[in-house]
Image (cartoon, rainbow, N blue to C red):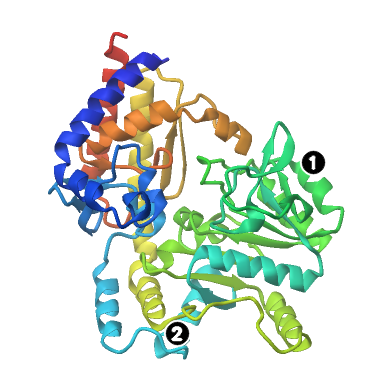
Amino acid sequence: MINPKAILALRERELTRFVNANPKSKHYFERSNGWFQRVPFHWMLDWPSPFPIVAASATGATLTSLDGQTFDDFCLGDTASMFGHSPPALASALTEQAGKGLSYMLPTIEGAELGDMLASMFGLPHWQVTTTASEANRAVIRWCRGLTGRSKILIFNGCYHGAVDDVFVDLRDGLAVNRPSLIGQVQDLLLTTVAIEFNDVAALESALRNGDIACVLAEPVMTNIGMVRDAPGYLETLRRLCSETGTLLVFDETHTISSGYGGHSNSHGPMPDIMVIGKSIGGGVPCAVYGFTAQISARMEALNKARPAGHSGIGTTLSANALAMSAMHAMLGQVITRKAYDHMLAMADRLVSGLRQVIEAHGLPWHVSHVGARVEFVCAAQPPRNGNEARAAMDHDLESAIHLYLTNRGILLAPFHNMMLLSPVTQSEQVDRLLHALDSCVGELLEIKA
């Protein structure tokens, strides 16, 4: 075990090094008084540093800061740039579209082709476009309630599906509670949201057999509370129980698109009734999509015909704007390819093997989890089976110290936990530099006399 005092000592040393190495970022932060908390959005403060690095540019799997530092980027915009920063095909498409108008509230020729491209890649025949995955999940929940006539949804403890009110229910000591951290929450979500632990077949069957759940909204692999893999056969059981109980199965594949070409559903199965994909689908341009089966499409059309005229509560003015459509058209047509995944998965295998060697060499009670091009090392001995175990396994002090150490040596991980993404342009040398830096970090932590 690593001594907590050693963690504190290393972190204090690395904080000083970070401040000294980033004077321009520090100055930018200190003078940004027009922003609330000095950043354009609050999660920019979630990095384990006294102020965020200011990005100057990024290309491929490399980011350059305002202070001129170059970073091997394994965060990649927390999935938004998972296929690399500004791929040439995307940059070209955005430049061309910028000269033709950005938003018309009308379809484009790229959009006509894009629908077929989505259907081909993800295996669902019909699609709709939103501005974010949060918006897509909200729309899907509304559709599912309308289609089934049921008010409740089922989620998994520790899940995250964006800024969607309905999903902010946790299990604490086995009891469902409204998430206490929410700002301005006034509704009791427990009336319409059921939360259970991931991989708990008995709880799943009990909840669905009541016949009042409109949909299960899930990631096929949980990723936002650390990584929680599906137990063997669990997703197949989930699919079967949803079908038997008339419950719609929704997979939010915004993160698990990293699993392989066509996302986790096509790479590993089973297929959902509805699939949501955001972030990387537009290469970082704000957009998301949700796709659904032909049967769901027919039910949606019937519901639309039966409802009174007026706003459906689904969609915004910028949904399916021309810039987003061009971005997705370029990404699916030229960037998100089977060849790209071949490289991503090979780099992931290299990283996973190297991480396990570092852990074994130092005799650490840690483990590595990964699905496709998404990799995490977790500072706990056993892989968690559910959100509660994942939450308990987190060592925020140790994780933040490691993160800061790596940042100071030109390695960026995702700020929320030790998650790493491999892109089609990530190079083996970058993976090896990460492994060398982590090996050095662990060695220093074990050597510090506290």
Which residue is found at the position 25% from the left and 41% from the top? 411
Residue 12 showing in the rendered view: yes
SS for callout 2: helix
Q: Secondary structure at mark 1?
A: helix
Front-most of 400 and 283? 400
Residue count near mark 2 (Cα–Cα under 10 Å), binned few <14, some 14–19, many ≥20: many
Residue 394 percent coordinates (x, y)? 50, 30
The residue depicted at 45 percent of the width and 84 percent of the height is: 111
Q: Which quadrant: the C terminus?
A: top left
Residue at point 15%, 34% (across, down) = 20
Q: Quadrant of the N terminus?
A: top left
Q: Which mark is residue 202?
A: 1
The numbered mark at residue 111 is: 2
State how far apart marks 1 and 2 are (Cα): 43 Å
Horizontal and vertical percent position of residue 438: 29, 30
Q: Quadrant of residue 79?
A: bottom left
Q: Specify few, some or many for label 1: CA neighbours under 10 Å numbering under 14, 14-19, or 20 or more.
A: few
Q: Amino acid at mark 1?
A: Ala
**Among the two numbered marks 1 and 2 on one chain, the one whose residue lies closer to the N terminus:** 2
Q: Quadrant of residue 149?
A: bottom right
Among all residues in the image, which is located at the extreme right? 210
